[in-house]
Amino acid sequence: MPFKHLKNIFVLIPAVIVVLALLAILSGWLWQTPPVPPLPQKVSLTEVTTADALSSFEIIGVLEADQKVDLLARVSGFLTGIKFKEGDPVKKDQILFTIEPDQYQAALASAEASSLSASANFTKSELDFNRTNDLYNKRTAPKSDLDNAQAALDVAKASTLSARAALDQARLNLGYTTVKAPFDGRVSDTPFSEGSLLGPESGVLATIVSQDPILADFGISDKYMAAMRLGEGTLPGQTVENIEVRLKINGEKFYPEPGELIYRAPLIDRGTDTIKLKASFKNPEAVLLPGQSVVISLTAKVPPKLLLAPKAAVMTSSQGNFVYQAVMGKAPGKDEGPEYLQAKATFIKLGREFDNGYEVLEGLAAGDKIVSLGLMAGGAALRPGAPVEVVEDEPKQETAG
C-alpha cells in the first residue's frame, strides 16, 4: 500500500509543476509594466532665409615694393659725403651721396664760355648775312658773296647748338655729383665709404624701396577664375572689380586696411597654371615689408543673396541630402494612436557650399524651420519619426541689406 500511494505522488508531481509554471507566466503577464516610450530628443530649430552667401578664398602671396631702384654713380670722382644712415627712411629728392664736384664745376664754366662765344659768332654771322643779302638785292654784291655769308651763318648756328648741348651736358654732369632719392622709401646699406673712387662701373651704391603703398603678388588657378566668371565658384558671378582683398599676418590676424586689385595678367602662366594678380595696400606705418609671405583672403564686396541652409543641419544618406523638420504625426507605419512631435526627413537639392551654409536649390522655402542642433544624442543620430522636443529656436540668419 505505501508503495502504491508513493507511485501516485510521483504521477501528480509533473502536473503540479506545469500548473505552477502556467500560473507564474500568467502572473508575470498580468503584473508586467507596460513599455516606456522613448524620451523625446531635444532639438533647436533654425529658420531658412535668403541671406548673403559669404565665402572666402585664401592663397599664399608675397609682398613686394611698389617701387625699387638701385642707385648708381653716373660720373667719376671721389665720394665726398654719405648723407644718410643705413636702413633709415628717406624722402624724395633727399641728397644721399655727394661726389667731388670741382672738375665738373670747371667743365661747366668752360661750357658756358664756349656757349657765349658761339652765340656771339652766330650774331655776327647773322649780321653779315643780312648786309650781304641787302647788297645782293641791290645788285651791288655777287651771288657768291651771298652764298658764303649763308654758309658762315649755318656754321655759326650749328656751333651755337653744339655749344648749348655741351653746356647742358656739363650742367647734368655737375648735377650727377649729388645722388638723390627718386621717391620716398627706405634705403639699404652701402658697400662704399667716404673717399672711395666712384664711377659708372662701380656698381650699386645703395638700394631704395618704397613702403607706402606696398604690393601683394599672388596667383589664382585659371580653372578657379573661369568658374568664378561663370558663376560656378564659391564667389559666384564675380568680376575682379567686385573682389575685396584682405591680408592675414602671422597666420590669423587681419591687416586692418583692405587692398585694391590693380593688376591681372593677360596670360596664364603655363608653368603654374595660374593667373598672376597684384593688390595694393596702404602701409603708412611700414608694418608690411617687401619679401614678407602673407595669406591673401579674397571675398566678394557685394555677395549674392541665396537661400541657405546651415551646414550643421544638412545630413546625407544613400538617397541624397536631407534635413529634419519638426512636425506632428503618428508613429511611422501606424494609422492609429496618438500624434506627437516628431522628426521628419525632408530631402533637398543643394548647390554650392559657402562659409555660412549650403545653397538650397529644391526642397525648402524661405521661412521653413529645420533642426540645426540636437541631431546627435547619446552617440546616436536622430532618426525619422523619433519624438523631439523643441527647446528653443536659433536666431534666423541675418539678411544683409
Image (tube, helix red, strand yellow):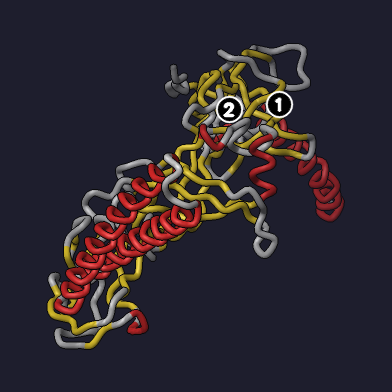
Position of residue 143 relative to residue 71, above or below, is above
Q: Nearer the viewer, residue 100 or 317?
A: 100
Tell whether label 1 touches label 2 (CB within 8 Å). yes
Q: Earlier in the sequence, mark 2 or mark 1?
A: 2
Amino acid bearing label 1: Ile
Report whether 12 appears left or right of 97. Answer: right
Callout 2: SS = strand
Q: Residue at x 19, y 61 (%)?
A: 90
Q: Where on the picture, by quarter, is residue 139?
A: top left
What distance separates the C-alpha of mark 2 from that of mark 1? 10 Å
Query: Looking at the image, which residue sits at the far front?
Result: 140
At horizontal 44% and vertical 47% (from top left) the residue drawn is 279
Where's the C terminus, which quadrant?
Answer: top left
Residue named by callout 1: 348
The picture quadrant where one finds residue 232 is top right
Q: Is residue 287 visible to us here?
A: no
SS type, badge 1: strand
Say which residue label 2 marks: 309
